[in-house]
Amino acid sequence: MLSISCAVMAARNVAPLPVYRFGRAVIIILRSVHPVIVAILSVAAVGCVAQ
């Protein structure tokens, strides 16, 4: 149900401009969460050696 509402909010031909921008922002943030978590876990496993 959440994906359907996000899809409708992010559809330019259905939603008004402020709702469209909010829907796109939600989708962009949710898509970027996974790589950030993987990067944090990788740094924690290997360690940061920058000096």
Image: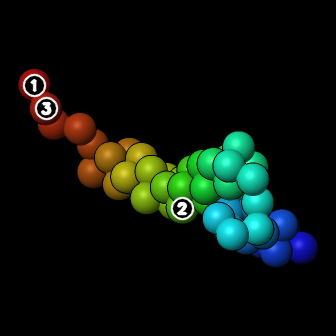
Residue that numbered label 3 is attached to: 50
- Image coordinates for residue 25, horizontal then vertical, percent: 60, 49
Q: Residue at x 68, y 49 (%)?
A: 17
Q: Earlier in the sequence, mark 1 or mark 2?
A: 2
Q: Residue at x 23, y 38 (%)?
A: 48
Distance, label 2 to label 3, CA atoms, is: 28 Å
- Residue type, label 1: Gln
Residue highlighted by disc 1: 51
Residue 50's x, y, as percent? 13, 32
- Contact (CB < 8 A) between labels 3 and 1? yes
Sequence-first disc among 2 and 3: 2
Residue 31 vs 46, above or below: the answer is below
Of the 4 image quadrants, the one containing the N terminus is bottom right
| Along the line of sight, the residue nearer the viewer: 15 or 38 | 15
Q: Secondary structure at mark 3?
A: loop
Task: Please state if 48 lies on the left or on the right of 4 as rendered.
Answer: left
Query: Please, what is the three-letter code of the amino acid marked with disc 2?
Result: Arg
